[in-house]
Structures are given as structure tokens and as C-alpha cells.
Image (cartoon, helix red, strand yellow):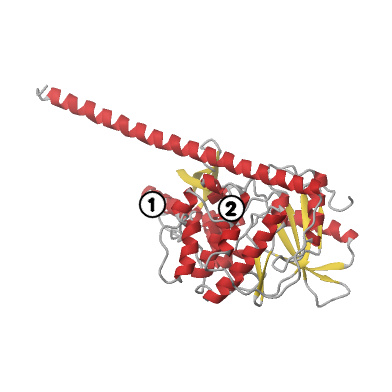
Amino acid sequence: MALLERRCSERERTDDTETLSCTIEAAQTLHSYTEYIIRIQRGPDPKECWQIVKRYSDFDTLNTILQVSGVAPTLPPKRLIGKLDREFVSQRQRGLQAYLDTLLAQPCLACCENVRRFLDPTSYPDSYTELALQQVSMFFRSEPRWEVLEPLKDIGWRIRKRFFLLRPKDQPKARLLLSWAEVGPDSYLSQKDLQAALKLLPNISHPHLQPIVLAEAGEKSALLVQPFNETGALRDLLCKSRPGEPYLRSCRRKGPGLPLSQLQSFGCQILEALNFLHECGFPYGHLHSGNVLVQGKTCRLTGLENSILGLPPLYRAELASHRRLAAMEVGDVFAFGLLLFELAYGRPPDTIPVETFEPSIPPLVASVLQSILSADAVRSCLPTVPMLLDSPLFHGVPLPRSEKPHLKMTSRLKESLRGLQESTEQRLRRDNREIQQFRRLARAQSLHGSEEERRKRKTLARKMWTCFGYL
């Protein structure tokens, strides 16, 4: 294929959803400034770590970028006189540690490209936009019927995905959205199967799936063209933001949840789309409020290409933390529960699993949320999509009239997608075992430390009693 044959750089496929943790280990004063030595750990394995050196001005630059979110943590204040004082440096170090802890505790900020590049500059070079432009330029050599209007910067949470606004040359008022992405860590399809799977996407027809105009694959990347949705996604509706605005603006939730009737209608449409994909054997796994486009009373899922490209889902860290959520269909139900929580409350849950639900939502909604997001549900078994469609909340909800769904694939492609799904689930299970192993190790070390402390105190007490002649 002439299109996109230029191979993307052979960098390691870092999973952008893996959690990062930071510890400021030391501070060193040099001439007129102080450097902070920070140890970064990716995931649960303490061996997966590295060090970076940052100055306060680096923190200040990052904090300025994050202010658009409205939820950036408070940075320790600046100081001109006495900033090299030892006590002040120690106090600032504690403040910067609290800043990093708060930053990484907020999922919206923790997955931000600027934060990831600040903590892991090696894995996140500032070259994705340039690489995307190169690939898009190659695309337009073979597709002269469209032209680029502008790049859409910083939309969506994915770091390795870039978006451009297009228009057909013969329809100057029409708008299309071009997206380019590298393959991810769950890319298990052969090049032939990857091309076949992407070519399938424009032929999928469902009233609640966003249509795709064109999908093309290279060796290590792919691009898609689809209609640009002027009204945006559910995330824009909840955040009262405009389509194309930076993703960080959606971190600040401005309004309440949706009315019950609208919640039921959108929820039922989403479940119908998921049920269709599951019945056809098409792996999805990428449901969240940014991937549900809204047009009046109709909503449509987008992001069908993500699983084909092996991109990790937004909630992968939560899925990997719970053994029962490894199956992709179960992960879709779990993601639906998180989305339903957003629709009900206007914001994502503060903690997962969710232990208590505020009484401000209708009992029917609370019951469904309890069956998906509670600790008991996550530990045992979640309802299936057909079970949710038959629940009192969604049963009998009228849906907009629409065309007949259509998805037809060859037996070879169906088998390849089944293998892709199984490999993706196996990596999730492997990560879950690793997380559980390190959790047990941490508990054992904690108990061992406690035993050591008890023995030391007991030995010291015996020495004191002996010293005073009581033994």
C-alpha cells in the first residue's frame, strides 16, 4: 500500500494508562537555584523506575499550563529572598511532593500529555504532531479530494493521537474529522488483518454508531476520516464546552447531571450499540463520555478503531486492578456504569469502587449503579448488556427511528478479532496478577517491619529491666 508506508519510529509501546507515582528523594542547591531529584515509578513494580531532576521553575511552567483545567493543585508560593535557606528548601520540597501526589490522584490530569512529558520525557518526546503531519501529508498525495483546514490541538485524552479538521473540495461548507494514531501496546493483528479490520469500519451501519468515511493502515499507524460532529460529545454536554476545545477544559464540571428521561434515552441507545457489537463479535472496550457523540436526541459511539489498533482504554488501570473485569464485554459494562454515574451526577466518581450513592438521584438509577460500581459487584459479577436493557431503568424506553444495523465480516477476520480480544484480555489478567503479587509483597514487608520493630522494642525493654536489676 502506498499510503502510510513510512514506518513509525521503533520506540517502545508505552502504555499511557499505567499509573505513575513520584517521590522527591533529595534537593540540591546550586549557585542561585535548587534542583529536586525525583524518582518516578511506572505501575506496581519498584524496578520500573527512573530519576528526573527538576527546578521550581519547571513546576511553575507545568502549573501554568494546567490552570485551564480549573482543578490544578496549589503550587507552593514563589520566594525571592531566602529561597536557598535550608529550612525553606525542605519546606518547599514537602510542598512540591504534595503537589505531585494531588496531581497524579486526579485521572484527568494524570493522563495529560504535559504531565506525562514532565515526568517521563524519554517516552513522550515532543514530536507526535510533526509525525502526524508527515503521515497526513502522505495521505493527501493519494486523496486530493480533501484539504486540511486546521489541526485540532489538545482534544481528547490520548497522547499518541492527533486530529485535523478537513473539508471536501467540492463541498466547501462540509466538515470532516481526520484522526491519526500509532498502534498501541495491545496491537496483536498482523498487517494484513489490521488492514482488513480497518477497511471493515466504513461498512458498519448502526443508528448508534458514528459512521466512518475512510480508514487506512500503515505498518505502525492508521488514520480515519469521519463526519465532524458540530454539537460534540456527552463530555461537552456535561461540561458545557464546545467541540474542539482542549481536553483539560473538561476537567472542570460546571453543571448537574442529565434529566432522567434524557439519561434513560441516551443510556438505552448506548446499550443497544454495545449489544450489537457484542453479538457481532466486534471488540470495543473504549466507552466513555468523550466517545459518545450527541446529535439532538440521538447519540452515537465512536472510537471503534481503538481496539483494532491495540490502544489501551481510558479505564485500563481500574480494569487491571480487579480480576473480574478482565473480559472485554465485562469491561464495557463497567465503563457503562462509570458513564451512567457521570450522566446522573454530572461528574465522574471520586473513588472506584463506589461505596455510597448520594440520594439526589432516582432509585432506579442508583440500583443500576449499585449493580455495576459497588465493591460487591466488582468482586463478584456484573450484569450483562441484555440484563441492563431488561432492567426497569431501560426496559421499554422509546428510541428514535433508524435504519437497519449492518456488520458483515469474513470468518477469517472474525477469528482474528477474537484472537485480538483474547490477547488483550490475557495482558489484563497478567497485569492483575502482577498487581496482586506486589500488593501481597508490600503487605508482607509491612508486617515484617512491624515484627522487627516489636522485637527491637522487646529487646530494648529487657535490657532496661536488666539494667535496673528487675531481671
Mark earlier in primary sequence (1, 2): 1
What distance separates the C-alpha of mark 1 from that of mark 2?
43 Å
Seen in the image, is 206 located left or right of residue 285? right
User: Which kind of residue does numbered mark 1 sit on?
Assistant: Gln
Q: Is residue 124 above or below residue 403?
A: above
Residue at 49% x, 46% y: name it.
22
* Residue 27 seen anywhere in this rendered image of the structure: no
Q: Which residue is mark 1?
A: 91
Disc 2 residue crowd, few under 14, some 14–19, many 20+, Cα 10 Å: many
* Residue 456 seen anywhere in this rendered image of the structure: yes
Residue 120 location (% of width, % of height): 59, 47
Seen in the image, is 352 located left or right of residue 403? left
Q: Is residue 137 above or below residue 466?
A: below
Q: Which residue is mark 2?
A: 331
Q: Quadrant of the C terminus?
A: top left
Q: In terms of depth relative to the viewer, which is nearer, 3 or 23? A: 3
SS at mark 2 in the image: helix
Residue at 73% x, 73% y: name it.
402
Residue 19 location (% of width, % of height): 54, 48
Residue 56 location (% of width, % of height): 50, 54
User: Which kind of residue does numbered mark 2 sit on?
Assistant: Gly
Seen in the image, is 369 located left or right of residue 303? left
Q: In terms of depth relative to the viewer, which is nearer, 91 or 111? A: 111
Disc 1 residue crowd, few under 14, some 14–19, many 20+, Cα 10 Å: few
Q: Is residue 268 above or below residue 282?
A: below
Nearer the observer, disc 1 or disc 2? 2
Q: Are marks 1 and 2 in contact (CB under 8 Å)?
A: no
Residue at 74% x, 42% y: name it.
10
